[in-house]
Image (spheres, helix red, strand yellow):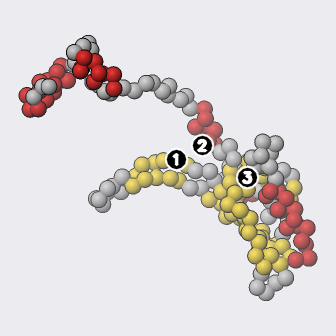
Amino acid sequence: MTLLLDGEQVRGKGLKITANLRIESDDLSGQTSNSDAAHKGFKAKTLTVSLLIRFADQAQLRSLMRLAEATESGGQRKTYRIVNDTASAFGMRQVQFSDGVSAREDDTLAAWRVQFTLTEKLSNPERVEKRRATNPVTAQSAPGQAVTGSTTGNAAAGTAEPAEELTGFEATLKKLDDYLGGSA
């Protein structure tokens, strides 16, 4: 199996790739045994890569570190086009290094056990989300009159502000409130 990032092969022995798709959800059961869950979307797919690089092939580890540390012109992590059978089967085309790169010395072999994670960039769910029409944000207001410092000053001065017209239900609630609490 091979792994190419922008056409550059990641070299090492025993290349193993684990693909992962996280599906976010929240439990809606509360304190019951209900199994309802709220779907919160698909998160970016990840590839966890592990391989072995011999101490004699130190240049291979240096090359991998150069790829991991590469940045774009704006300082963001570099996005790579990936060529790999597992990535292709998962529908991944572009990836970025994430969660770090680790290289630990093997206990018996004169080699490093290298592990790193590649996260999908511009995934299909991300593209779909960007294409969706956004709902325009409208100003929100609560029914009733806003309480501000100037209103209390006007009330103290004896000038009343014009009352807002209440709906039938609001008028009924106002009558009940006045009855229970007395109007000031």
Q: Position of residue 160 (x, y in %)?
A: 24, 14
Query: Callout 2: few (<14), some (14-19), or many (20+) C-alpha neighbours within 10 Å?
Result: few
Relative to 74, say whether 106 is above or below: below
Q: Disc 1 on helix, strand or loop? A: strand
Q: Position of residue 14 (x, y in %)?
A: 79, 72
Query: What distance separates the C-alpha of mark 3 from that of mark 1?
Result: 20 Å
CB under 8 Å between discs 2 and 1? yes
Task: Please identify the quadrant where the C terminus is shown.
Answer: top left
Judged left or right of residue 58, residue 154 is left
Please tell me which of labels 3 and 1 falls first in the chain: 1
Judged left or right of residue 111, residue 182 is left
Query: What distance separates the C-alpha of mark 2 from that of mark 3?
Result: 17 Å
| Residue lying furthest left | 179
Q: Position of residue 78 (x, y in %)?
A: 78, 49
Residue 164 sits in which quadrant?
top left
In front of the other: label 2 or label 3? 3
Q: Which mark is residue 41?
A: 1
Amino acid residing under circle 2: Pro
Judged left or right of residue 4, residue 127 is left
Residue bearing mark 2: 125
